[in-house]
Image (cartoon, grey):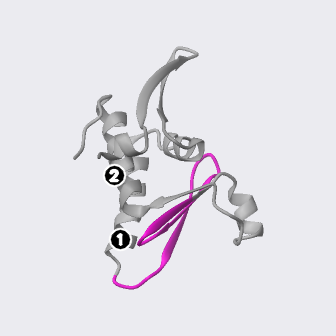
Amino acid sequence: MSITTDYKISFGVKKIHDRDFKFMRSINYSLDSVITDFRNILNCDNLLGAINSIMESPSPGEILYTTEGLQLIKITHTTTEIYRDSAKYDSDPGITADFILPTADFKEIVIIWRNFVYNGKISLM
């Protein structure tokens, strides 16, 4: 199966006040919301850089990545956790994530999203 099938991913464009906004739909609203925060290539590339650095690191660790929408992405070598409210996580890091997925899957979703942001088409690098 493919990531787009596994997570029931679809992309679209909605016109709001004469501007086109790209969005993603999937099996989880938190995943949709966090991905949609990355609206340009530079932001997507920065997130991919963070994912790559943690996946390539020989020692275990984590990266906490706050989005423009003040959501939090906690990336480890094996899993990625998404929190809709970074302030709640800051006050209690033990709270349950709103969505958890394998980091390898998250990376692939970000790559697919980046390609959609860049050219409006779904394709893999």
Q: Within the image, what quadrant is residue 107 found in?
A: bottom left
Magenta-colored stretch includes residue 14: no
Residue at disc 2, secondary structure: helix
54 displayed left or right of 2? right
Most distant residue in the top direction: 18
Range of magenta residues: 58-81
Residue 113 can be seen, yes or no: no
Residue located beneath label 2 in the image: 108
Name the residue at 34% across, 47% down: 3
- In the figure, 17 relative to 50: above or below? above
Q: Are marks 1 and 2 in contact (CB under 8 Å)?
A: no
Name the residue at 40% across, 48% down: 44
The image shows residue 11 at horizontal and vertical percentages of 42, 30
Name the residue at 40% across, 72% down: 54
The image shows residue 42 at horizontal and vertical percentages of 39, 47
The image shows residue 81 at horizontal and vertical percentages of 55, 61
Task: Identify residue type, mark 1.
Answer: Met
| Label 2: how many Cα within 10 Å (few below 14, some 14–19, many 20+) | some
- In the figure, 11 relative to 92: above or below? above
Q: Within the image, what quadrant is residue 77 found in?
A: bottom left
Magenta-colored stretch includes residue 62: yes
Along the polypeptide, which appears first: circle 1 or circle 2?
A: 1
| Label 1: how many Cα within 10 Å (few below 14, some 14–19, many 20+) | many
Residue located beneath label 1 in the image: 55
The image shows residue 99 at horizontal and vertical percentages of 58, 55
90 displayed left or right of 46? right
Most distant residue in the bottom direction: 59
Residue 105 can be seen, yes or no: yes
